[in-house]
Image: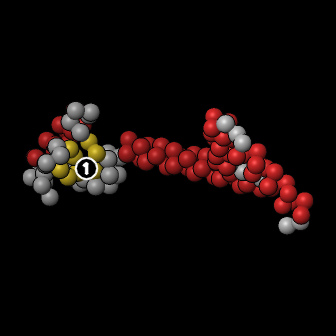
Amino acid sequence: MSKAEVNEAQHSNEQVLSMKPSELAELVRVIVQEAKRPDPLTPAEIRQMEQQQEQRLNQSDQVKAEIEQKVARQNICTHLRKDGTARIVYVQNQNYLLCQKCRKIIRPEKEPELFNELFQLQMANNQLFD
């Protein structure tokens, strides 16, 4: 440190020591507030964040498309084999039917007609608990 810098630091220390407690508290508050302030983002960081956001949007679109395809496949599925027997399994403790082909869960409260039809078909063929 040069002599001028040392003199300036001593003068600054004397100013701080001669401050009123309320002024000193305000100075400390401002210093802490400035220390907590994040550094401004660089253009590279901004570009990276924009690219990540775009990737997330693309990925969410892909997931939505996959879900739509799955639901469409489940709605097309007859849940029956070629021989007329059902491809479903009754999950007793949860009270729903599960198609073994399309993995659709058929609940009696949501689709009572389909549930009853497939349940009765399985009961007639003694395949309910296969």
Q: Residue at x 85, y 54 (%)?
A: 8
Camera-nearest residue between 43 and 22 = 22
Q: Residue 13 versus residue 97: which sits nearer the camera?
A: 13
Question: Residue 106 location, x and y as percent?
Answer: 26, 42
Q: Amino acid at mark 1?
A: Leu
Q: Which residue is mark 1?
A: 98
**Quick check: 17 left or right of 91?**
right
Q: Residues within 10 Å of mark 1 (few under 14, many from 20)?
A: some
Q: x, y (%) of residue 76?
A: 39, 43
Mark 1 lies on a secondary structure that is: strand
Question: Looking at the image, which residue is at 14% across and 58% down?
Answer: 130
* Residue displayed at 72% across by 42% down: 18
Q: What scheme was used to colour the molecule?
A: secondary structure
Q: Position of residue 27 (x, y in %)?
A: 68, 41
Question: Can you tell which quarter of the image residue 22 is in?
Answer: top right
Residue 20 falls in image quadrant = top right
Residue at the outermost bottom position:
1
Work out whether 115 lies above or below 87.
above
**Picture residue at 46% right of the left edge, 46% below the top:** 67
